[in-house]
Image (cartoon, rainbow, N blue to C red):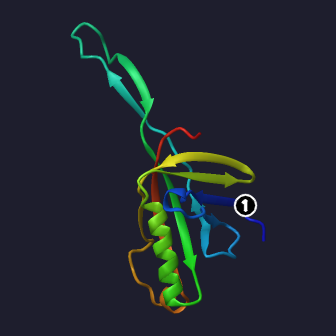
Amino acid sequence: MTSLATVSIDRTGLSLSALVIETSGAGTYVMDQGGLGRVGTTPRDTLATDSPFIHGHTRVASVLEETTLPLVVRVQSTTSALLNTAVTALETALHQFVYTVTVTVDGIARVWTAYPATIGAVDGLVAYERVTDFYEVLSISIPVYPVSA
């Protein structure tokens, strides 16, 4: 099956090749259906000191605030030990101080500078079926610089 989208996490700072998360379902790291979020933007305005003679606010600067890339990733393996190794590799990649994340959807790539991510079980539980079938579903929030390269 062809992958509609991929997320590639650069690990050159760890002397490793990129960790790739796909939608194809065949690999260790798979985005669940609806598991790739869109990076949004929020302005951060600097306002002039309030004046008793001017209505409203006067903006003196407006830039984009840091934002996040949300993901839901299924990590799957054939044994509990291999699953633990795969989850640890993903966590290590996502906890780098600064790295790049490349999101490719339908052949169009966007690259963001990323920072240490928040990662956890999607429901916060150790579910029986996930343990016995050797997979984990993780909710990930990657802080990114608001403008893609």
Q: Is residue 146 above or below residue 61?
A: below
Q: Quadrant of the N terminus?
A: bottom right
Which residue is at the far bottom?
A: 132
Which residue is at the far left?
A: 52
Please, what is the three-letter code of the amino acid marked with disc 1? Leu
Which residue is at the far right?
A: 1
Image coords of residue 55 (percent x, y):
31, 13
Residue in the image at 68% along x and 74% along y: 25
Q: In which quarter of the image is residue 29?
A: bottom right
Q: In this view, does 118 lie above or below 101?
A: below
Image coords of residue 106 (percent x, y):
74, 54
Residue in the image at 52% along x and 77% along y: 86
Instruction: Kindly identify which residue carries mark 1.
Output: 4
Q: In which quarter of the image is residue 30?
A: bottom right
Whether residue 119 sits left or right of residue 148 in the image: it is left
Which residue is at the far top?
A: 53
> In the image shown, does 142 or 18 lie closer to the viewer?
18
Image coords of residue 97 (percent x, y):
41, 53
Secondary structure of the residue carrying tag 1 is loop
Image coords of residue 139 (percent x, y):
47, 66
Residue in the image at 23% along x and 11% along y: 51
Q: Is residue 61 above or below residue 2?
A: above
Residue in the image at 53% along x and 85% along y: 82
Whether residue 76 sits left or right of residue 121 in the image: it is right
Mark 1 surroundings: few (<14), some (14-19) or many (≥20) residues within 10 A: few
